[in-house]
Image (cartoon, rainbow, N blue to C red):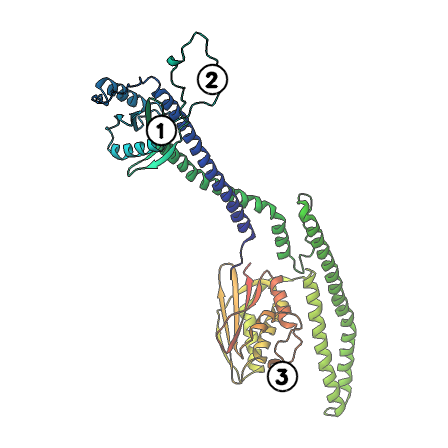
Amino acid sequence: MKLPSFRLRIALLSAALAGSTLVGFGAVSWFQIYNAKISRLDAELLNHLMRATPNFPPREEPPPGAASPRRENSGDRSRWQFYEDSLSYAFGTNTKTPVALVVMDANNNILYQSNSLPTDLEVNRLLLKRLELTPLGQPPKREPPPLPSNRNPSFEGPPLIRPRPPQFVTENTATAVWRIGATKFPNAQVAIAVSLQAVDRDMATIRNIFLVSIPGALLLVAVGAWLVSGGALRPIRQLTGVIQQVTVKGLDQRIPIGTTDVEFVELIQVFNLMLSRLERSFTQASRFSGDAAHELKTPLTILQGELERTLQQVDPGSEVQQRLSNLLDEVRRLSGIMRKLLLLSLADAGKMSLYLVEVDMSELLMEMLEDVEMLAPHLTVQTDFIDGLRVKGDRDLLIQVLQNLFSNAIKYNLANGWIQIRTHQTPTTLHVTIVNASKDIPLSDRDRIFDRFYRGDPSRNRKVEGIGLGLSLAREIARAHRGDLTLDLTSSGQTAFTLTLPMK
């Protein structure tokens, strides 16, 4: 399962927050701009409605029984046609804006209506409907001025009627959207419809700008958040790098605090203190094991010498000789353990000294084969290597590595089993692989097989002598030669170790 990235989460969350903010700001801005344009259009429409009617002369009503006058004449129509044409360029745009106009007298007789648009019939219907819904203005509520004494009241004109402020509405037809305003004067009624295609075109341009700029801004925010979070997480990367280098030879690593943010100072200080405690504890443990092995080496050597000399003085085949021989074997075994502990302590401290000479690995492998034929004649041995495989290394230590590998191949082999020896040479490295028939190693044991004093499954190893230091020491020797020792993945029923050594 792939773990989520904290840095990626920060970048995505920043982009999401910025995106929601920009989208909200863009939507509010778009509506504000749209309302401002509509308000400006309404103001211009109101201005033209107010200018359209006062110059129109009132018509006298015919006497009863007389014929009604014509609803319009050619002079009036040409005047309104010219007025309509001027309106097309009067609404704040550089292009001709579709406009529809309806003019009626006080008796609802149509004096003029537009007939040049494909949708004039539908627009005119909307204009007439709007005029029907527009009420007539009311006279102002104020006290009349005092009349002069020499003025005849019978000659007073009708009271002044002011038109109500027109209400503007937006109506849709099959092909366009219109902004309609209508007003009524005592002697005329006027309704104007202005197409919103210019406004819609401007708003579409603004919308496209938002659609392009907002994703670009989100990309910049995401990249910026990614870079900023990367800089903020730099101390964490430093901690990770130091932790990866924390080995028995890297406990002296420390993280500098000079340029670190204050939020990470305490964490780094605690980590540095932990490394100091680990280094001190490991140094003490390594020194103890090295000193103990060195101090025990002399008594064990003396004890081994005394046992060997006493063994020569007793009667051959006696019970005392047998007991002394068993004691000598245990002393030799204990001496071998002390040598391994001393080498491991030197390896931990990085002080394992190597006497580098040119070593013929083919010759060493042949010597190991002779030992196998003598110690385990029941095993089948297969070889696949050539003569002249030479490396630069410590001959005695490399012999110890090979002895450990062949010893394990014999001890953990099956009855009537087999051993294979293969080599592979590259221009820079030599790979020596030793494979033997064996029981399958559990996965839990594979991960810990190089740990010190680890013996694995007791039911698998109860008949095999050892204390669990051989493989650990063999790997340390290989790494001291700038190589490695690994447990290979193999098919069921076999075990394979590969020793890798540099050619130079």
Residue at image coords 29%, 33%:
123
Residue lying farthest bottom? 318
Sequence-first tag of 2 and 3: 2
Residue 387 in sight here: yes
Could you tell which of marks 2 and 1 lies nearer the N-terminus?
2
Task: Please identify, in this view, whether the residue under mark 2 or under mark 1 is nearer the observer.
Answer: 2
| SS state under label 1 | strand
Task: Please identify the residue farthest to the left as the structure is shown.
Answer: 67
Asked whether residue 197 is in view, the answer is no
Give residue 64's position: percent from left, percent from top: 24, 22
Pick the front one: 182 or 278: 182
Rendered position, 97 above or below 282: above
Instruction: Give the residue type that dot 2 points to.
Output: Pro
Element class at badge 2 = loop
Inspect the image, locate mark 3, and give the three-letter code of the amino acid beneath it: Lys
Amino acid type of disc 1? Ala
The number of numbered discs placed on residues in the rendered structure image is 3
Q: Give the residue pinned by disc 3.
A: 463
Q: Which residue appears at 69% of the width and 48% of the height? A: 265
- Where residue 483 sits, quadrant-wise, is bottom right
Q: Separation of disc 2 and disc 1 at Cα?
A: 30 Å
Task: Decide: is 48 above or below 284.
Answer: above
The circle on residue 144 is 2
Image quadrant for the C terminus?
bottom right
Cα separation between marks 3 and 1: 110 Å
**Disc 1 target residue:** 182
Closest to the camera, between mark 3 and mark 1, is 1
